[in-house]
Amino acid sequence: MTPTNITKAARAVAGGQIPKPTGLAQDAFAVRTTIGRAPDLPAAVRAAFSDGYDRDLPVTWDAVDPAKYAAAGSFTVKGTAGGRAVTAEVTVIREGQLVIDLGKDTGAFHGGASGTLYGLYGPGVPTNNLIEGMRLRTVSTKAQDGAQHPGADALEVVEPLADSTDGDVYIYMTDAHRGFPYEWPGATPQEKLDLYKEKIAKQIDQVRKLDPKYQDNIVFVPFNEPEGNMFGTGKWSYNGVSWLSDPRDYFRAWDEVYAIIKGRMPAARIAGPNTSVLYGQVKGYLEYVVEAGTVPDVMTWHELSHPEQVRASVRRYREMEAEVFAGTPYAGRKLPINVNEYAFNYHTSVPGQMIQWVSAIEESKIDADIAYWNIDGNLSDSAVQANRGNGQWWLYNAYGGMTGHTVAVTPPYPGRNYTLQGVATLDPAKRQARAIIGGADGAGHIRFENVPAGLFGRTVHAWVREIPWTGQIGDSPQPKLLAERDVAVRDGTAVIDFGGADLPGLKESSAYEIVLTPAGKGTATSPVTELWEGSYEAEDARYTGTGYSRNGPEGSPSDVSKFYTSGRYDVGGLRTGSDGVLDFTVEVPKAGRYDLSVFANSLNTFDKVREQGPTNVFLRVDGGSEQELFLPLGYKWVVWDHVDTAVELSAGRHVISLAARSLDGVRTTRGDAIVDRIRLSLPNPAAATATYPAELADLRGARLSYDVPGSTGSGVAEVRKGRSVTFWVYSARDAAATLDLGLLGSGKALVTVNGVEVTEARRGDSTVAVSMSGGVNKVTVTGRTGTSLVDRLDVRPTPDALPATVHQAEAAALAGTAKAAPFSLADGKAAVTGIGGPPGNANTLTFTVRADRDGTYAMRVRYANPEQSAATHYNPDPLARHADVSVNGAAPQRVLFPHTFHENDFWELTVPVRLKKGDNTVRFAAQELPNFDGTTYASQTFPGVLLRSQYAPVIDRITVAPFSGR
């Protein structure tokens, strides 16, 4: 009898998720197993066979020499099943092995995972730095002037998006309504539809009034999750009939709305059906719209379950599409796809979770938008405040920095969620390979195979950086350098091993970036960021006193609606009236000044928290060295941020305590906090100056060269006239730093920071002090004459390098209702409230500021914004406030200030202003802003629904410093 193979299940996992078999006469069934571990072959084949045919098949396997499982490689196992000969291919792998095949091109790099639902609030929230640095491609958001949520109006966010990345805004036209399901008015089904069509027409006419260069960045989404909303079975449905069971009414509505949009804007793009999942009924939708001539320009649906579903759904849709389009004018055509809601609370903000989604989306070559479960304007849990990023933001910054084409990536367990996954690219023009990986704990054996000798030679230069989880609203510095070194290429393979002598093991919450270039002629490397780190769970700490609670389990792969939490548990008890003490026992390798981060959360609207804002606790080391910490606020419980300090420790064991009462018994905790963990790290003094290699920067017309004597790392960026290189630079504070541009060559180059010119650099004259914004700064070097060879950018915090003057708000000129009020956490214990109000108000705050010379200055505004709208569902709906800032009576610039979660929680935001030599007036004013038409107001259109604030934030102080030292 001819041997028959069981299934074409290439590289499945024994006992794991097995692809469905498609027949008996197929290629070999492959089972992956770890070195030294024999797989359960009968169980694996039974699982595969039963999954496909709903019946079992006993298998008897021939004996296998155990030695075959001791080394990586493949071999064939023979057996019999039901009297027929069968074979199985066994592939033995290393633990945590991920193979990147640089010889297998899988298509041009797409970058489509960089999208967000409700991720932009308005101009400046978030900043263009965060938009561009994340390479944001698509944003789904509400209709202009819609009632669904405060902010995120489509025609107010399209300009910052288009100006930053030329990305597209998908308008959720249904979000003109309040509530979810949508509360669309009408006494009869026809009246509901007719009134909605009027709103559709109005939205299109609004878009037609945009500058034409922005109209091309609009995509209309007529219905959102229609099967559960307008054409579902609930209270607010069209007629109580789901389109999934009877689609006729939905199809008619689709055609009518399609005709309105195309009739008013023939070139408009329309997306649909925008279902909550890819239902089988979508095939019927395709059949209908092909016949009716109303095919959408973009196919959209949502994936909120797990990353692997993206791959399965895209494959399934493409099969539907090919079958339906065959024999029609659409034959052979593939519609663009935007999975415009993906991931859940457990995933968002966590680099090790999100890389699994990113890998599936990039492999599928589609666009996708991270879902909106929490607050708008924060890039779907990527942005912190206005200009800071968390670990997720830095993941997407690394992802967006990829160029060239993607290559095949084979993870240890293909097809399985919550395992090590990755994305990799090769750019032959740059002679550079990049990979981002993550999602697993422990050892990681990363193999770059088929490394092109013609591009890289026999040795590659490798940067290995960690992108850690820093909490949903926890600020993150740039990725942490773990190693920079030359790696030999043997038999076409370069290997990076995590968990060995040279690199720490992987953390499942972190993502990792690996960049390979030719070794070049570089003479120095960057120092690693930290010399040691340790993480300690609150649930493992010792608690004494009253009020203790151990909370959890929090989010997990089986409960993705909950938030990710380190160790899955957290601890409560430090609150008003408590005498609790939480003791962490730690052990450090050497004496030094250690950085300490406390991951914690206080719900801003909770009774005990509302009184003061941030919850204060008392940090002690070995029962002494006390300091007061204010634990951060959040918009929900279990939304993690971190507060940072430093502690002096000798080598050995210590007890770090968080207490609800001070040592003298006079001060006590006010508020209520939960604690997730603490993190200790020993910073490397050699890394106090942060180095940004040009090889890792964004190139715009510049090219990399690896044969330049005197360079560091592996090479330089050649920057000719009009071409540029951009660095994304982190600053912990709104403060001055010294930039030292490593230049070779004879050219001159213009250096700008956040769009402001700071110096013209040349070799030997390339150092300048600059006022940096807290968070992410865009530093661009543009060639002016000759060729500048940009080696690196060194950034050193030097807060005293530029003279700064502090102006307290309570000492400034107040008008109208603006008044000084006590705030315990304000500088000077007072700040100014009541700035702004109805249109035409005179409630202002005016500072008099002296400047030594004409020029651009950094005005650092310390502010608080407590305003929040009543939520209709799971989104808390905080508001951004704005201030119209006028210098010397000139036309004001409008500045948005994101929500700080409490009126006693103060943040800083840097605003560049032009001052003249001598005295200047800087006035803060505000009023309710009108709708798109410039005459009506949201408060009139939707009485009782707070959509736009009338007020400026609470102003504590401004600090004014020269923008640069040149």
Image: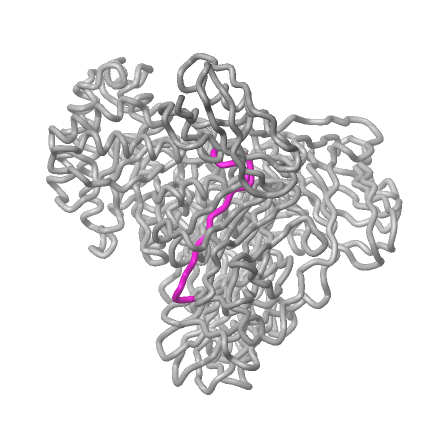
Question: What x and y, as percent, mark residue 252?
Answer: 15, 24
Using residue 501 as the reference point, say whether residue 935 is left or right of it. Answer: left
Residue 166 location, quadrant: bottom left
Is residue 324 at all visible to an observer of this figure? yes
Identity of the residue drawn at 14% across and 29% down: 256
Give the magenta part as a residue range.
Answer: 412-430
> Residue 44 lies in magenta, yes or no?
no
531 vs 337: above or below: below
Q: Nearer the viewer, residue 271 or 913?
A: 271
What colour scheme was applied to this rendering of the protein?
Answer: one colour
Residue 794 location, quadrant: bottom right
Question: What x and y, as percent, mark residue 585?
Answer: 83, 41
Identity of the residue drawn at 57% across and 33% down: 563
Identity of the residue drawn at 64% across and 60% down: 483
Question: What x and y, as percent, mark residue 620?
Answer: 83, 46
Is residue 633 at all visible to an observer of this figure? no
> Residue 418 lies in magenta, yes or no?
yes
Question: What x and y, as percent, mark residue 872?
Answer: 43, 27
Q: Main secondary structure of the magenta part?
A: loop
